[in-house]
Amino acid sequence: MTDDTIFGKIIRREIPADIVHEDEHLIAFRDIAPQAPVHVLFVPKTPVATLNDLQSSQADIIGRLALAAANYARQQGFDEDGYRIVMNCNEHGGQTVFQIHMHLLAGAPLGRFGTPQRVADAG
């Protein structure tokens, strides 16, 4: 896995992004196609393609992403009303950029989550 994804390019400042947080471990920026009034992506600076590729020795990466998202929600005042954090894995899980990242969604009631999509009977 190389860091030659769109997120790697954002980290290296090769393409612009609306960055809301950055530290030595991760970067966070607003999604260009938001799925909620607030949609921020938290991306580790360590290149890992999917959650399946994460090693047990790298568990701190997920912790840092979650804590950064929670801190951002608290700073922005979304913590009381609520927010959602989501990670997608591979195509059927909705992953489109193959660098792990966490979505923070907030700013409106988000409704139920996880309802399976209905598939028509095959016959």
Image (tube, rainbow, N blue to C red):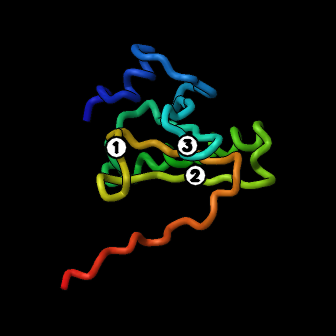
Identify the element where label 3 is drawn.
Answer: helix
Secondary structure at badge 1 equals loop
Say what amino acid the circle numbered 2 marks: Ile
Of circles 3 and 2, which is in front? 2
Q: Which mark is residue 54?
A: none
x%, y% of residue 70?
Answer: 68, 46
Front-most of residues 88 and 113: 113
Q: Amino acid at mark 3?
A: Leu
Which image quadrant is residue 46 in? top left
User: Is residue 121 shown above or below 91?
Assistant: below
Sequence-wise, the earlier of marks 3 and 2 is 3
Q: Is residue 41 left or right of residue 7?
A: right
Task: Point out the image quarter for the N terminus.
Answer: top left
Give me the disc on residue 96.
1
Earlier in the chain: of badge 3 and badge 1, it is 3
Q: Return the residue at label 2.
A: 85
Locate residue 102, reporting x and y percent.
51, 45
Camera-side residue of 33 and 62: 33
Q: Residue at x 51, y 22 (%)?
A: 17
Residue for point 35% across, 39% down:
97
Residue 3 spot, x, y in % from top left: 32, 28
Q: Nearer the viewer, residue 48 or 55?
A: 48
Q: Which residue is mark 3?
A: 65
Alpha-carbon span between mark 3 and mark 2: 10 Å
Inter-mark Cα distance, 1 to 2: 17 Å
Q: Quadrant of residue 123?
A: bottom left
59 left or right, relative to 53: right
Q: Amino acid at mark 1?
A: Thr
Mark 1, Cα crowd under 10 Å, few <14 / some 14-19 / many 20+, is few
